[in-house]
Image (tube, helix red, strand yellow):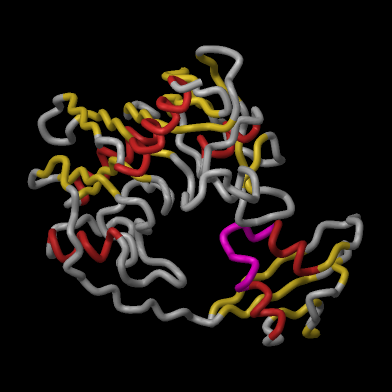
């Protein structure tokens, strides 16, 4: 068991303890906090409280956190689309619907399960047993290129390039509407949505600096095909930024319309096409591009035909 103690500053407007904890402890999920409250593992001034308790200035909150056992992550013989591989790293083209690493509800069928089978023990251990080799991620329904590191040496070098935003990351996307300008820059900080904790939002308190460059590739009237270049790499950055200027990504069921206008489309039409970086060992610049997935190219062909037949 571990304990976390919080002393509530005074004066403070009374607020429900579940809301206070979720806003204060950003590293703990809301569902886990709800579980602690339900199991009477949260006390205020020495007494257990329910989720609707109103926290006030001067309160002392104590959370008793049970040790969580991590499930065994097994290697699985899942085919990989490999764009490049050497003794230090591997660049893969992640398919739509595949989760990058195991997490609650997804302990098999992930990219990590496939990598463990392909690479055996040759994966960096910096991010622990749940994320071996993983130095950056893309969303489950985003396709495209991803760097995976086989040792800690390469992991540290790639992580440093990500931190200084020197990696060339270019995405392709189809967005709703007809963008007014041929190119533009969205410079708006991104942080956790104040009400919906699974979502991100722009210009929220505590948001981190985020910049996305975009340019129009083709216009289809109701939709626009664009390229996006990431200057920073925040969670859901392109999806949040494009939605913030009222051009959400087609198929995005989190930041776009509740009902997708394209029958059968699952998830956002977002593809991590190009990755360019300095190789950790050779020092040479390397660049790789993942081809557009079939569903994405079919949509483009359909939209092009619609424009021609008008």
Decide which of 256, 192 is in the foreground and name it: 256
Give the total of numbered labels: 0
Q: Residue furthest front?
A: 309
Q: Is residue 195 left or right of residue 245?
A: right
* Horizontal side, residue 145 vs residue 269: left or right: left
Which quadrant of the structure image shows residue 52?
bottom right
Residue 139 location (% of width, % of height): 43, 49
Compared with 160, 194 (above or below) is below
Residue located 85% across and 67% down the image: 55
Residue 144, located in which quarter of the rendered image? top left
In the image, residue 254 sits, relative to residue 188, either above or below, namely: below
Q: Is residue 158 above or below residue 263?
A: above
Q: Position of residue 198 (x, y in %)?
A: 60, 56
Who's the residue at 41% across and 80% down the image? 69
Considering depth in this image, is 101 or 39 the residue closer to the camera?
Answer: 101
Residue 268 is left or right of residue 261, and the answer is: left
Q: Which residues are magenta?
A: 24-32
Q: Is residue 115 left or right of residue 257?
A: left
Q: Residue at x 26, y 28 (%)?
A: 276
Residue at the extreme left: 87
| Quadrant position of residue 271 | top left
Front residue of this view, candidates 229 and 303: 303
The answer to whether residue 229 of the structure is visible from this angle is no
Horizontal and vertical percent for residue 287? Answer: 21, 28
Please say whether residue 93 is one of the residues in the magenta stretch.
no
Q: Is residue 25 magenta?
A: yes
Query: Residue 109 location in percent, x, y?
Result: 30, 67
> Does residue 291 show up?
yes
**Residue under the image location 17 percent in, 51 percent down:** 150
């Amino acid at each position: 068991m571990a304990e976390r103690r919080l002393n509530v500053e005074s004066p403070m407007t009374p607020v429900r303890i579940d809301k206070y904890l979720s806003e204060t402890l950003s590293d703990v999920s809301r569902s886990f906090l709800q579980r602690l409250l339900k199991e009477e593992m949260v006390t205020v001034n020495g007494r257990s409280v329910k989720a609707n308790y109103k926290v006030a200035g001067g309160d002392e909150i104590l959370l008793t956190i049970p040790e969580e056992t991590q499930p065994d992550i097994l290697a699985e013989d899942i085919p990989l689309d490999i764009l490049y591989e050497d003794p230090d790293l591997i660049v893969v083209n992640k398919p739509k619907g595949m989760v990058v690493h195991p997490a609650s509800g997804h302990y098999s069928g992930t990219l990590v399960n496939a990598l463990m089978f392909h690479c055996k023990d040759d994966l960096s251990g910096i991010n622990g047993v749940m994320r071996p080799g993983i130095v950056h991620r893309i969303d489950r329904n985003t396709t495209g290129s991803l760097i995976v590191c086989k040792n800690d040496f390469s992991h540290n070098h790639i992580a440093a390039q990500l931190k200084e935003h020197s990696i060339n990351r270019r995405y392709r996307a189809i967005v709703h509407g007809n963008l007014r300008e041929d190119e533009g820059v969205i410079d708006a900080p991104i942080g956790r949505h104040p009400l919906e904790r699974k979502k991100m939002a722009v210009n929220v308190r505590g948001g981190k600096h985020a910049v996305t460059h975009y340019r129009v590739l083709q216009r289809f009237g109701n939709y626009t095909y664009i390229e996006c270049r990431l200057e920073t790499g925040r969670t859901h950055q392109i999806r949040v930024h494009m939605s913030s200027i009222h051009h959400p990504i087609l198929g995005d069921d989190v930041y776009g319309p509740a009902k997708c206008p394209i029958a059968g489309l699952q998830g956002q039409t977002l593809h991590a096409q190009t990755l360019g970086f300095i190789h950790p060992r050779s020092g040479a610049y390397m660049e790789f591009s993942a081809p557009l997935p079939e569903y994405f190219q079919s949509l483009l062909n359909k939209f092009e035909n619609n424009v021609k037949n008008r």
